[in-house]
């Protein structure tokens, strides 16, 4: 296993981003959202155009630390001297959004059981529960084309995304992006809950759709329950405290 390296020239903003992202990987592992050594959470490096952080290919999410995250440019070149490889599939997909979506500061792609199950249905996510109602009319869909290794698929991903920031990759999984990591984390958490409940509802009986007029009120009012620190910030901070009690090694 390659060793972590130090970055004496790294800015304070980069180190903060590294720690935030490393904590996020540990949280995802704790929540059961990891997929062996696969899938990715990527984060732009503040103040550096075209540079973002990605997990080292070959490590479990529970092994990710601030110093072993790999900094690459938008074309996949390693910028920090890391000895770790980068998963080509992850770079190909995530770089498209970091390059072409201005507010895609953080991009999350997962293969959770519930997310893949819902993405593999004709109906997709349905407005049948509290969390799903928040996403009604706000999810993009992209048909499965196989593993994301071909750059030309990026054009179709962007076209299908449009002005939305949540995507169901049909037969594949979920994709969430946001202008901050805490916001992306919260969106993923809510989407995961929506998918889990939809799968459970289907097993329990006949799903009951939330009426359109109620969805409109729900989406209007849901922002009113946020703390003033910003979308997802208190939620993410709470999970960082939890993960820090389990293993603070992610900070190194």
Image (tube, rainbow, N blue to C red):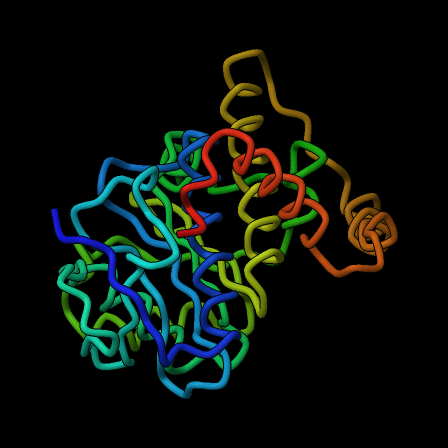
Pick out the residue farthest to the top. Answer: 204
Q: Residue at x 79, y 59 (%)?
A: 229
Q: Is residue 31 above or below residue 65?
A: above
Count of residue discs: 0
Left or right of 143: which side holds 115? Answer: right
Q: Nearer the viewer, residue 32 or 241?
A: 241
Looking at the picture, does residue 158 appear above or below residue 25?
Answer: below
Q: Is residue 203 left or right of residue 22?
A: right
Image location of residue 228, percent across then percent down: 84, 59
- Residue at image coords 47%, 40%: 248
Judge left or right: residue 123 versus residue 226.
left
Along the line of sight, which residue is nearer the eye, 123 or 141?
141
Residue 175 or residue 33, whichever sits in front: 33
Q: Residue at x 44, y 75 (%)?
A: 45
Residue depicted at x 48% and y 48%: 23
**Residue most extreme to the front:** 8
Image x and y of residue 2, in percent? 13, 53
Residue 35, how many percent across, how many down?
Answer: 29, 37
Residue 151 as seen in the image, left or right of residue 26:
left
Q: In x, y percent, where is residue 137?
A: 62, 56
Quadrant assignment, res 66: bottom left
């Amino acid at each position: 296993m390659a060793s972590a390296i130090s970055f004496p020239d790294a800015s304070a903003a980069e180190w903060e981003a590294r720690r935030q992202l490393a904590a996020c990987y540990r949280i995802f592992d704790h929540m059961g959202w990891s997929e062996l050594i696969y899938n990715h959470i990527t984060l732009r490096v503040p103040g550096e155009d075209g540079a973002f952080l990605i997990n080292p290919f070959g490590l479990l999410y529970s092994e990710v630390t601030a110093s072993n995250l790999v900094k690459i440019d938008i074309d996949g070149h390693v910028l920090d001297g890391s000895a770790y490889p980068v998963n080509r599939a992850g770079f190909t997909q995530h770089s498209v959004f970091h390059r072409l979506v201005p507010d895609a500061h953080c991009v999350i792609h997962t293969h959770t059981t519930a997310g893949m199950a819902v993405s593999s249905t004709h109906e997709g996510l349905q407005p049948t529960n509290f969390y799903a109602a928040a996403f009604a009319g706000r999810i993009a869909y992209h048909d499965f084309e196989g593993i994301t290794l071909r750059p030309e698929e990026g054009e179709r991903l962007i076209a299908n995304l449009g002005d939305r920031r949540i995507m169901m990759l049909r037969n594949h999984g979920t994709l969430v992006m946001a202008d901050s990591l805490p916001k992306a984390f919260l969106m993923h958490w809510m989407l995961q809950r929506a998918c889990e409940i939809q799968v459970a509802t289907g097993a329990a009986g006949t799903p009951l759709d939330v009426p359109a007029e109620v969805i409109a009120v729900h989406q209007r009012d849901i922002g009113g329950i946020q703390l003033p620190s910003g979308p997802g910030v208190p939620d993410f901070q709470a999970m960082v405290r939890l993960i820090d009690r389990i293993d603070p090694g992610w900070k190194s």
